[in-house]
Amino acid sequence: MSAARTLRGLGGIALVLLAWQGVVGSGLATYDYLPSPVAIAASVPELFYDRGVIGETLHTLGATLAGWGIAVAIGLVLGALLGFSPIARAWGLASVELLRPMPAVALVPAAMLLFGFSIATELVVIVIPTIWPVLVSTMRGIMAAPARLEDVARTLRLGRIETIRKVLLPAAAPAVLVGCRLAMSTALVLAVVAEMIGNPEGIGYAVVREAQALHPDLMFAYVLIAGMLGVLLNAGLVALGRLLLPGAFNRPSAVASASAP
Amino acid sequence: MRMLAAALAWSRGTLPLLAALALWQALGHVSPQFPPPSTWLAALAGLARAGRLAPAVAETLRILVISLVLSTVAGFALGLVIGMSPRLRQWSEMLLEYVRAIPQPVLIPVFVLLLGYSDLMKVVVIGLACVWPVLLNTIAGVAAIPPLTFEVARSLRLTRSDTLRKIVVPATVPSLLLGLRVALPHAIIITLVMEMFTGAVGLGGLMIAAQRKFNAAEVFGLLVLVGGLGLLLTGLSAAAERLLLARWAPRA
């Protein structure tokens, strides 16, 4: 992103904040609980002195990363199995197709029943739905590897394992990375949902707590922090992808980045 | 005949799921939190007899459809406006990127506080969550129209509204449909979260009520129902997309 584009992007954000300040400050907006950006900024020190925002952010971040990690591991294994083995697809794919459209959050009440208000509830809620994007993109990535590549592998007399390791997995890697990135935004959304309803900790719970205590300035501050967490996680994953696989994200796919759970 | 064979071949794949459910049923009541599948159906039937199931399904679908339609219209219109102006695109880029990154469920308490427990709150919350795929895809779709096309429009002296109607909209419909397909699951999810969080009438409200009563059979029954609804809606949207794409086929 060029410097001029960055400046214009920041300018757009500044304009919106100015307009927000103007609307609230001039009394045009009549909502009781809509603080101005200045009031929100003024509440930030309170987040650190009275609220433990660092611990709350770390809780949400940790739960998201842990849930994502577990889901990626499971999704990779199952996706590879379904991608490589036509038998596994014949006898298992339909189960995946039936389970996948299940709205992820419907698991929250079931998980709460089993694990109560706990981190276990949060992890279950994060992990199960986060498996799907990884599983599906891994499977499709492997299946989409050009047949030519397998011919090359045969010509080179690579064994089955070597073909998978040296030819098919690298061919599938870009698709897998896209799936992992999608999975990260899914994981963050579900962590927040779990915290709002099932496990009273972290950023999700903090927003609810401040809303119920009628502290709209603190509530908005937490919402903005949640957004920064989202930006940070996405940027981190893109950087990781560039490191592991130069060029994988060169073609930004609006569809892929627009999809969350 | 071929279709029947294909259906049979597909249905083999449901065996792991069916086997898991059968095992669960055979094990019976291992713990009160894990009631066997047969009790789920009985619990659902009980809810239906009490007259609570149908209104909940109807209300969830009503708010879902209203929100999805409004947010799609808004997202498509805004996407056309932003997409057609490179300047606007650059100025709004970071803002959109940031707002989209906010995990949308945290907006539920915000709008409950601002707008109260109203239909408007529900539509705003669901709309804000599912507008992104349509909005961003539309922007990308307009941006992908080759500049030459616009030069042709200029040399044909098409007016701005004609350019929009005859060139931009037809070229963008496939992106819109793709965005809509991504938006639907978001819409279902955020609708359920909103209902769970506010305890509103609807399937999410029923689920959270069942959980608070520790009625595990109801929780699992509703889970299956919601899963079936998700499957049905995604199937319907895929069919609608195929139908519309046949009409608005993307031209290479």
Image (cartoon, rainbow, N blue to C red):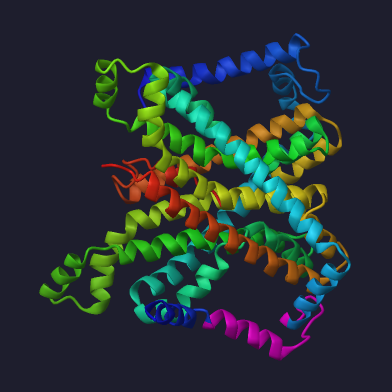
Q: Is residue A80 left or right of residue A129?
A: left
Instruction: Say which of B244 and A137 sits in front.
Output: B244
Measuring 43% from the left and 23% from the top, which residue is drawn there?
B89
Whether residue B103 is visible, yes or no, is no
Residue at position x 64%, y 32% in the image: A224
- Please tell me whether residue B65 is drawn above or below residue A124 in the rendered image: above
What quarter of the picture does the N terminus of chain A occupy?
Answer: top left
- The answer to which of A215 and A133 lies nearer the viewer is A133
In this picture, residue B151 sits left or right of residue B17: left
Please, which residue is most extreme toward the top here? A26
In the displayed structure, does residue B219 sit left or right of residue A67?
A: right
Measured from the top left, where is residue B140 in percent x and y? 40, 34
Res A103 visible = yes
Q: Is the magenta stretch mostly helix, strand or loop?
A: helix
**Residue range of the region highlighted in magenta in the rendering:** B15-37
Residue B137, x across and y down, in percent: 44, 38
Asked whether residue B36 is drawn in magenta, I would say: yes
Q: Position of residue B232 (x, y in %)?
A: 59, 62
- State which quadrant residue A101 falls in: bottom right
- Does residue A168 show up magenta in the picture? no
Q: Position of residue B219 (x, y in %)?
A: 77, 68
Asked which quadrant contains residue B210, the reply is bottom right
Q: Residue sitting at 27 percent across and 26 percent down?
A: B149
Asked if residue B220 lies left or right of residue A65, the reply is right
Please tell me whether residue A45 is drawn above or below residue A148 in the rendered image: above
Q: Looking at the image, which residue sits at the far left?
A: A155
